[in-house]
Image: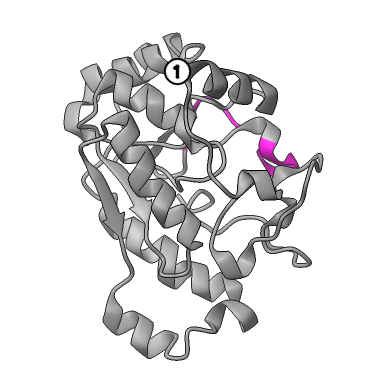
Amino acid sequence: MSVARSVLTVLRSQAQDPVRLLSAASAQLGKKVGVMSSFGAESALLLAFVAEVDPDMPVLFLETGKHFPETLAYRAELARFLGLKNVIDVRPAQAEVQERDPTGELWAFDPDACCRLRKVEPLDLATLPYEALVTGRKRSQASTRAALPVVEEKEGGALRLNPLALWEAEDITREMARRGLPPHPLVAEGYLSIGCAPCTRPVGQTADPRAGRWAGLAKTECGIHTAS
């Protein structure tokens, strides 16, 4: 589904301020706005903005069954801390997992297929009710995101809002500290971008925070942001 030009104009006029952008999206689209969050290394700031605008805004968390235990604990802690009231765990269909990944090792020999099973397909279904999806992606995360717009129209009319697209890592760190937001516990161990445990490695102070995702492979995205 596509969003009206007038709505896009309003959203783009607020692109410089994350809170104003989220407020405008909520005012224009109501319950048709959903937030995608990995509850990862820098997720707390975007979720703090969401809580400030509307604690009832749906927050979709892909529960792949392959997360670090620390991520699951952080998901619960951060939701409580911010007062988020509508965090939704999105899981792959158990029948599909049993059929396509019966040993739980699909990630080791076909990570793209694993991402489709555990992330892309479940999220496609879970996001059908929403006209706009909010993400925490930033230009500074990787070269593949260097031109990321704040208000992003995808093929087919899908709309992504990336309120932190223009923020640098140091700005996020500083604002998280100013707000007293709890950090993901794995950040202190060198994990600057945190996904599923089998496919994530610590990278330390690398120029590309996502270098630890699918390390050694040409793969740089799970697919949830590259599909229309």
Residue 166 is at least partly visible in this image: no
In the rendered image, which quarter contains the N terminus? Answer: top left
Q: Locate residue 125 relative to residue 208 in the image: left or right.
A: left
Residue at the far top in the pictured view:
13
Up/down of 87 relative to 73, above or below = above
Q: Work out whether residue 116 or residue 91 is closer to the camera in this orientation and state it.
A: 91
Q: Work out whether residue 131 or residue 215 is closer to the camera in this orientation and state it.
A: 215
Task: Name the residue rendered at 56%, 21% in the picture.
Answer: 177
Task: Name the residue rendered at 68%, 62% in the picture.
Answer: 219
Across and down, in percent, residue 223 comes to 53, 58
Across and down, in percent, residue 30 comes to 19, 26
Q: Locate residue 154 relative to residue 203 in the image: left or right.
A: left
Up/down of 92 relative to 189, above or below = below
Q: Which residues are magenta?
A: 141-153
The residue singled out by tag 1 in the image is 18
Confirm whether the magenta stretch covers residue 149.
yes
